[in-house]
Amino acid sequence: MRIGAALRGAVGLALAVGLQPADALAAGGSDLQPFQMVRSLQLVQDRIADGDHAALPMQRKLLEMIDAKLREGDREQLGDPRNFRAMLVYAMSGGNPATIEAVMARLDLDDTEKGIGAGVLNYLTGRPKAAQAALASVDPMQAPAELGAFVALVKGSLVALEHPKPALALFDQARLLGPGTLVEEAALRRTVGICGTIGDPERFLAASAQYVRGYLRSPYASQFADSFVSGVVALHASIDLERVERIVAMMDPEQQQVVYLRVARRAAIDGLKELSAFASEKAERKTPGRRQEEDPRALLYSSLASITSVSIEEVQAKIERIDRARLSPDDRRLLDAVRAVAAEVIAEPPAPNPKVVMLPAGEADSPAVVPVTGADPARAGGVLVAAPQPTPAIGKTGEAVSPEDPANVLVTETRKKLDAIDKLLGEAAK
């Protein structure tokens, strides 16, 4: 979309010298039409998508001004197709649904306009089924240029949960129709989330790389990070970690560490040892130009993932280096759980406490008799036999293993601890 030279210059100057949006609009003319004001809004939003967080207050102020303009507008002015389409763009940019509903009630609209208007209004007011029905016949690629990208984004968002693949096609249309805008930024974010859910690693990585290259400074980038971390963990079995590393490398050092720590934590909780080790190692790397210390979170998450697969002494040595004071309350609970399991594993086995009774020698052939190595069968005219026990388990060598065996007791208790930590980690993941 192109903005008139005078208006573009006024808004651009205002952004450069820090004037308020009202000053910019006044400089462009006192009788601006709604469609001109909405174009100013889109210019500000493009700056936001590019990482200009200082433009956020300007966006809010412009939305307020456009809302007032629409409420005050007469029927003839608002009936201008340019102003009607601008009103819908305003609506999909965070506008007031009540204003949209009031204006639409005053206008004579054709079927297409009614369909788009009803779809947008229902979407804004939380009626997704009604919005889908109203927009079902609207083709974003055939819609007016200023509306197409928004319509594609809205339609894709409405069907994303139930029909993810058609939603991806709609998000592609939104990106095609609105390159370099907040619409494309939102479409890419949603694409990353869907691909992680449906198991499409190739498209997930491609969309993630595009987002990081173009929109990492967006105020909504934290939502992308959520989807990216979840996708890497969900796709762990098929994802190319070298490509993940290249994508993360495009972020600044602090963002890299945060992403790797979050991946390490999620992977450790899910028991994904290789992924957790990969992410923990990346998170522990030194950041150039800064004095570095071991990050206690990276040590903790790598310990969680390896506690059942490496030397327990190695795990203990690692967790002893963790500075508890630098952990969050939830991570302190995880540390306590790891320490409890490690302590249990290296604890001394419980002393044997066999329960025995004496039977007459004549009953020595009873199936219940279990000769004890080193015992004297002739002593007191009888033999040592085990007290009644449950059917013994069979070990890997084929020998009977008594449930009272000290090693069995230790394994059982350790498994209980592991079950407890699994429960704790499950709660922490919620």
Image (cartoon, rainbow, N blue to C red):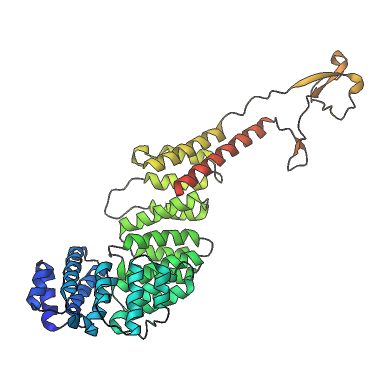
Q: Residue furthest top?
A: 380
- Asked if residue 385 lies left or right of residue 285, the reply is right
- Asked if residue 413 lies left or right of residue 126, the reply is right
Residue 191 seen? no
Q: Who is closer to the viewer here, 61 or 211?
A: 61
Total labels drawn: 0
Quadrant housing residue 6: bottom left
Question: Relative to 321, does residue 8 appear above or below in the rendering?
Answer: below
Residue at 35% x, 70% y is: 122
Question: Relative to 25, does residue 224 appear above or below in the rendering?
Answer: above
Q: Who is closer to the viewer here, 21 or 315?
A: 21
- Asked if residue 279 lies left or right of residue 98, the reply is right
- The quarter of the picture where the N terminus appears is bottom left
Residue 189 coordinates in the image, percent (x, y) = 37, 67
Q: Residue furthest right?
A: 362
Residue at 34% x, 41% y is: 326
Residue 44 seen? yes
Question: Relative to 140, does residue 405 appear above or below in the rendering?
Answer: above
Quadrant housing residue 79: bottom left
Residue at 72% x, 23% y is: 354
Residue 314 coordinates in the image, percent (x, y) = 50, 41
Question: Relative to 339, does residue 210 appear above or below in the rendering?
Answer: below
Residue 98 coordinates in the image, percent (x, y) = 26, 67
Residue at 30% x, 60% y is: 252
Q: Who is closer to the viewer here, 246 or 304?
A: 304
Residue 82 coordinates in the image, percent (x, y) = 23, 83
